Image (cartoon, rainbow, N blue to C red):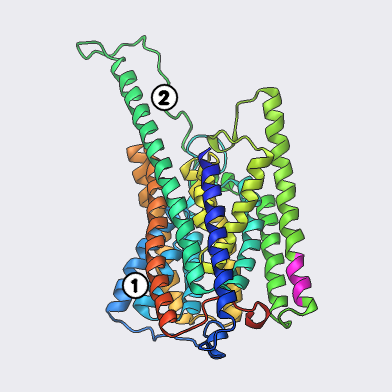
Amino acid sequence: MATRVLVVYLLSAFSVAIIAALVITREETHQPHLSADNRGGPSNEKVWPKLVFSWRIVVSTAIAFLGSAFGTVGGVGGGGIFVPMLTLIIGFDTKSAAALSKCMIMAASAASVWYNLRVIHPTRDAPILDYDLALLFQPMLLLGITIGVSLSVVFPYWLITILIIILFLGTSTRSFFKGIGMWKEETLMKKELELKQEAKYNSRGEFLLDTDYEPLDCRENPSILRIMCSNLRWKRIAVLVSVWASFLLLQFLKNDVAACSLWYWVLNVLQFPIAFGVFGYEAAKLYRESKNKRMTGCTDSMCGASIGWTAMNLSLCALCGLLGGTVGGLLGSGGGFILGPLLLEIGVIPQVASATATFVMLYSSSLSVLEFYFLKRFPIPYALYLMAVSILAGFWGQFFVRKLVSFLRRASIIIFILSSVIFASAVTMGVVGIEKSIQMIHDHEFMGILDFCGNQQH
């Protein structure tokens, strides 16, 4: 019920915002005070500060480290924190900041995936990375990113800001309340465990030998190499890489053709059968498996969670994958702001949700990074420095939080981190967006939706 309320909230708010943008576009199209330059869309001027030691570098490094650490633990990346940091503190232009943000997300995700490959599943004898969910979301996420990148040069900045605030406030609020619910459940479980422990002793503190009990985890401690081998599914990885390579090839080919030409639309349309084909195959597989389990009365479920795959659930996953990718393309993030909360919403435990979300973001962010590299959208020295910071943060962030979760026996900590990162992103992106929108109004710039074909840049 709560999921449906969230979806209705997002669709209703998005619809109102887009309708308002269309109305403003209609009213301002023929306004005489708007010059031709002000109607031409976002500026292409690159602003690349030099990489020199200063207080800006120190502050940015600290924010980048914390953002990458908490972003990867929560499975949301941290693009909503990186872009404002790069524009406000260091001084990059918006497009370069978005490109560098992708570099940081890719590096942090890679470090996080490397760490998670060395971790066993907390409840089942299964990989910590859920490859079924990765195959379900990755193609839709990549498709959404290509849509979001195209819309980012068409939508006015104020509209992008409003859409991001609506999305981030909705997902952060929902995740926060889900974290509270899990915290309460964990508290009850700890109390029950304490009562069981107390029942093993009599009033004089003597241990009762005839007390029945079961150990918390009877699994052996395998070696790191064995854990990594059990977490790797090479056939699934090959499919994911094939989908990633297909989108990358189409993007490179599209950059060499004129905007809105016949081949431009052909290459854009080709992305849809690839995405929906892989998604449809995986969705049909999960639906059949779930149906067979229900018919046989099997209670075993994926990820230690009760995921009943229905047509409604799978349609919601497709919609949210597209939405997450679109937001990632608009913002310069990896799409984790949708994927992380959604995995929790469908019943995936936090440890698996975090690991799977960062695994999927590795593909989406690396696709954008390669494209931005060949388009020369970011300075290499800054990219290498910030990627190094993000790699260290991604690895050690996972290490310390996983240890904390294991010590306190509260996986809800991951959900609270996720919610906090999303809320912080809403605040930072909101402040930057409102400030820039006010400046655009003051400069009498065009505030409507721009012409699609005239503003597509390669």
Q: CA distance from mark 2 to mark 1?
A: 46 Å
Name the quadrant of the C terminus.
bottom right
Residue carrying label 1: 60
Which sits earlier in the primary sequence, circle 2 or circle 1?
Answer: 1
Which quadrant of the figure has residue 147? Answer: bottom right
Q: Position of residue 250 (x, y in %)?
A: 72, 71
In the image, residue 269 lies in the stretch drawn in magenta: yes
Q: Residue at x 25, y 11 (%)?
A: 202
* Closer to us: 341 or 111: 341
198 relative to 297 in the view: left or right: left
Q: Is residue 419 above or below residue 97?
A: above
Residue carrying label 2: 215
Instruction: Specify whether residue 332 is in view.
Output: no
Q: Position of residue 234 (x, y in %)?
A: 66, 51
The amino acid type of the residue labelled 1 equals Ser
Q: Position of residue 451 (x, y in %)?
A: 64, 79
The amino acid type of the residue labelled 2 equals Pro
Report if the CB atoms under discs 2 and 1 are less than 8 Å apart: no
Query: In the image, which residues are magenta?
Result: 264-270
Tally of numbered tags = 2
Tell me the element at label 2. loop
* Closer to us: 303 or 143: 143
